[in-house]
Amino acid sequence: MWHRHNIAGAFYFGMRRIPQWLIVAVLVASGCHHEPTSSSEFAAERKKMVEEQLRPRGIRDQRVLVAMAKVPRQEFVSQNQRGQSYADSALPIGHDQTISQPFIVAYMTEQLHLQPTDRVLEIGTGSGYQAAVLAELAKEVYTIEIIEPLAKDASARLARLGYRNAHVKVGDGYQGWPEAAPFDAIIVTCAPDKVPQPLTQQLKEGGRMIIPVGTGLDQQLYLLEKKGSELAQTAILPVRFVPMAGEAANK
Ligand code: SAH
């Protein structure tokens, strides 16, 4: 009887007897902290993010939802944050910068009304995640990052993931990218205190620009539409981005 109980109550690992309670405790503990590691687990998390964070908050553009369900956000966050890849928040990417919350990425992208033939300019490459989402939807993406190591990492990451239509440049995005202008759409992911003139000049007639404007905590996301000599501006959402560095900060 004792012998039977002993066998039922323990597992043998090599020559060592491991009590059942310890195995149960380890399984429970690992279950509590289970983080996705395989690409299928990340894909499931991504689908959940689309269904729970994007759709209920009004993201409707099917192409944007498909792109958000496709781009592997875990490849754009630092190794120790991978388990948080699809959390409903911004995450640190080093150099005091952050990758934006998935909803903000989807929202700003949707506002651009991108066509597969469009050429897009992004200011503030950061991790390259927003650029990858844009690259799923537009023909060419030009993105500028002022912090050199971030630009280099993002460029390598985008190439490794096969985004041949995403072009990264190190520099001050205040001046835009005149050699590649004009653009059908411009997205700015750092906040100047007013819209940089070179960017409005590099926007095509009929083009759309989405840009956070303001200082400190007092920022608004603006949608600018270029119609003839007019630049229609609509404030659409209070937001919080890192300030635009470089020329914008020295004015
Ligand atoms: N779009 C990024 C997140 C943006 S974080 C992503 O998907 O990960 C804002 C980024 O803007 C930071 O990396 C910051 O270094 C960059 N930035 C700030 N001022 C800039 C400027 N003047 N020109 C280009 N990039 C700038």
Image: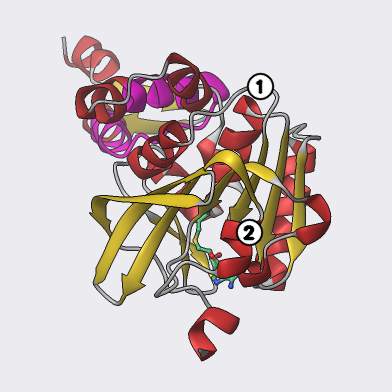
Could you tell me the amino acid type at mark 2? Answer: Gln
Q: Nearer the viewer, residue 27 or 123?
A: 123
Expressed as whole percent of the image width and height from the top left, the position of residue 195 reads 47, 66
Q: Where residue 50 sits in the image (x, y, percent)? A: 35, 24
Give the image quadrant in which the ligand numbered 1 is located: bottom right
Please state which of residues 146 and 76 is positioned toward the viewer in this rendering.
146
Q: Is residue 143 left or right of residue 244?
A: right
Q: Which image quadrant is residue 242 in? A: bottom left
- Which amino acid type is shown beneath numbered disc 1? Pro
> Secondary structure beneath disc 1?
loop
Neighbor class of circle 2 (other Cα within 10 Å; few <14, some 14-19, many 20+) is some
What residue would you read off at disc 2?
A: 201
Q: Provide the residue span drawn in magenta.
A: 23-50
In the image shown, does 159 or 22 lie closer to the viewer? 159
Q: Give the image location of residue 236, x and y in percent.
A: 26, 47
Residue that label 1 marks: 116
- Residue at position x 65%, y 29% in the image: 138
Q: Secondary structure at mark 2?
A: helix
> Magenta stretch containing residue 71, yes or no?
no
